[in-house]
Image: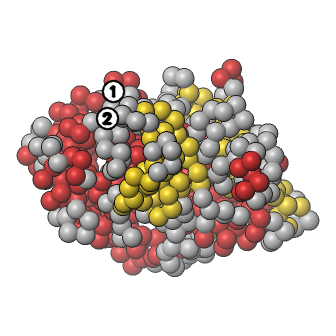
């Protein structure tokens, strides 16, 4: 097969534009470049503003995970101002953060990921007709209820936060919320409806408790064949179909992971600090690199701009980070090719390396040693990774595994609310300080660093999960996680390279779905949409 350069150009299924450029030799991707095509600039907007501006500006960074941006922005100020956060406020923050993620899981699966299962390249699969019946956009028997019911959890967010998306009800010292018993009862009823009608009835075909009994890869396979309900559930079909069409064979990535962690045990984080954060987490933080676990430390995070459209060519910690854009035409002459920076993490003798963020990273952190009694201790994906390795399939299965887990956590937090106690403690607004706040958005690790001087924001840096994953090469020419995951991917039909979509969408990146194929001399071969949703 003639070598080809394939370009995925701006028409996104999700917010933002991502260009993917790959070289294909003999049907295999041999090199890849991820290009974030739009300048964001929120860090520049926030400079010089009131420290609380991030509570309003940051939720506008993303239209689907604005609650996650609010969550980490509030904690960044909590640590900078040394606030007190009442347990009720921590519970409400946990509930709303989880509600947003629970919304995202089915919406992403049906509206962004599973529709690629209907691609004609899979027509030879014995399961193809069933895939089309279930997952065809808008008309699929599973697509419709899955997307519709995905909206239920954020109804709970709106009950406690006033609105979703773009709420600003989380503030330093707690939440601007005074829920009643009726509010809590409604929230419970909504989550129960979502669990009964989608999570158990449609997705699992069994109880939440039965799924969470699974501990090994062999258990997963046995679960599928255990009974007709599980075998024919969307989860059972997803597992069978992925294995049939080979999504367990490519998209491995860098194999190293970062989780900043999320959700706090209320009694352990009443006075938020950077140093006390890891021990208070329920969803654990951690670094998994070269088969070893390491404690997460925000001091080890750096951003490289060697190949990004910004001034500078050396890694900087976000407290000292710079966001100084340059003309892309000038930047391309310097070897720069993306508006995304390249986040990197310093891991002892391994140096400063790229890490994958996302559900699979969270699952690896959950399988690490030394979990406290209040922390997630789940080694399922450590077992799966050891037996079949990372792939498009495993990355997606990790995300779906979190739906029953987070549902159980939310139900417990709702039961713990004490409506007679406070939801807010007024903070002292210190004129000087540094703060760090982070969470795990549906897509992965999301964090803010704020520097306050003279009562104003001197520096504000945001590192998103998509930046961790789609960031370009660094100063050592090491590929970013999605770039690395694309390498080795098979391209069965260069005029319809659905495999590129599988890989990038397994990270839930801001992927586009119009592809232009060129031969080495630059002649356009075709232009088309891959299962596009415009």
Q: Is residue 518 above or below residue 379?
A: below
- Quadrant occupied by the C terminus: bottom left
- Quadrant occupied by the N terminus: top left
Judge from the rendering whether residue 430 lies leftward or rightward of residue 19; answer left or right: right
Picture coordinates of residue 249, whole percent (x, y): 33, 32
Picture coordinates of residue 151, whole percent (x, y): 36, 70
Judge from the rendering whether residue 68 lies leftward or rightward of residue 108; answer left or right: right
Of badges 1 and 2, nearer the viewer stands 2
Q: Is residue 529 above or below residue 3?
A: below
Q: Are marks 1 and 2 in contact (CB under 8 Å)?
A: yes
At 60% from the left edge and 70% from the top edge, which residue is drawn? 60
Residue behind mark 2? 248
Residue nearer the viewer, 269 or 218 = 218
- Give the distance between the C-alpha atoms of the residues marked 1 and 2, in whole angstroms: 8 Å
Q: State the SS at label 1.
A: helix
Residue behind mark 1? 388
Query: For mark 2, does the 10 Å Cα neighbourhood hold few (<14), some (14 to 19), or many (20 or more) residues?
Result: some
Q: State the SS at label 2.
A: loop
């Amino acid at each position: 097969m003639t070598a080809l350069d394939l370009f995925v150009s701006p028409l996104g299924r999700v917010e933002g534009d991502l260009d993917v450029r790959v070289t294909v030799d003999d049907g295999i991707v041999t090199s890849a470049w991820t290009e974030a095509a739009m300048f964001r600039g929120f860090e520049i907007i926030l400079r010089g503003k009131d420290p609380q501006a991030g509570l309003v500006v940051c939720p506008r960074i993303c239209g689907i995970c604005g609650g996650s941006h609010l969550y980490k922005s509030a904690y960044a100020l909590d640590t900078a101002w040394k606030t007190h956060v009442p347990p009720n406020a921590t519970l409400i923050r946990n509930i709303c953060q989880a509600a947003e993620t629970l919304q995202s899981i089915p919406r992403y699966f049906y509206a962004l990921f599973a529709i690629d299962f209907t691609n004609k390249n899979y027509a030879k699969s014995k399961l193809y007709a069933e895939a089309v019946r279930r997952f065809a956009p808008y008309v699929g028997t599973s697509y419709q209820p899955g997307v519709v019911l995905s909206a239920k959890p954020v109804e709970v967010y709106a009950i406690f936060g006033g609105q979703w998306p773009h709420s600003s009800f989380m503030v330093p010292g707690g939440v601007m919320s005074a829920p009643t018993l009726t509010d809590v009862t409604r929230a419970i009823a909504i989550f129960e409806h979502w669990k009964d009608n989608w999570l158990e009835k449609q997705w699992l075909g069994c109880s939440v408790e039965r799924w969470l009994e699974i501990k090994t890869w062999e258990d997963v396979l046995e679960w599928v064949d255990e009974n007709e309900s599980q075998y024919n559930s969307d989860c059972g079909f997803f597992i069978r179909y992925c294995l049939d069409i080979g999504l367990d064979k490519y998209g491995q990535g860098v194999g190293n992971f970062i989780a900043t962690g999320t959700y706090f045990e209320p009694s352990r984080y009443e006075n938020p600090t950077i140093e006390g954060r890891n021990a208070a987490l329920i969803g654990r933080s951690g670094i998994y690199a070269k088969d070893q676990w390491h404690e997460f430390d925000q001091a080890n995070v750096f951003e490289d701009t060697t190949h990004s459209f910004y001034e500078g060519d050396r890694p900087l910690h976000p407290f000292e980070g710079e966001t100084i854009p340059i003309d892309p035409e000038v930047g391309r002459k310097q070897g720069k090719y993306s508006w995304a920076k390249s986040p990197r993490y310093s891991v002892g003798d391994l140096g400063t390396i790229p890490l994958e963020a996302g559900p699979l990273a969270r699952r690896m952190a959950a399988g690490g040693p030394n979990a406290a009694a209040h922390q997630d201790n789940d080694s399922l994906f450590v077992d799966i990774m050891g037996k079949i390795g990372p792939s498009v399939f495993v990355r997606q299965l990790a995300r779906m595994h979190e739906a029953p887990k987070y549902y159980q956590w939310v139900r417990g937090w709702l039961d713990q609310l004490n409506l007679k106690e406070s939801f807010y403690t007024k903070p002292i607004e210190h004129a000087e300080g540094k703060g760090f706040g982070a969470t795990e958005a549906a897509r992965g690790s999301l964090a803010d660093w704020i520097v306050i001087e003279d009562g104003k924001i001197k520096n504000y840096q945001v590192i998103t999960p998509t930046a961790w994953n789609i960031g370009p090469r660094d100063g050592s020419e090491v590929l970013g996680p999605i770039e690395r995951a694309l390498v080795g991917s098979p391209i069965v039909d260069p005029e319809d390279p659905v495999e590129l979509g599988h890989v990038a969408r397994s990270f839930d990146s801001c992927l586009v779905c119009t592809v232009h194929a060129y031969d080495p001399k630059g002649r356009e071969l075709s232009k088309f949409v891959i299962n596009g949703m415009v």
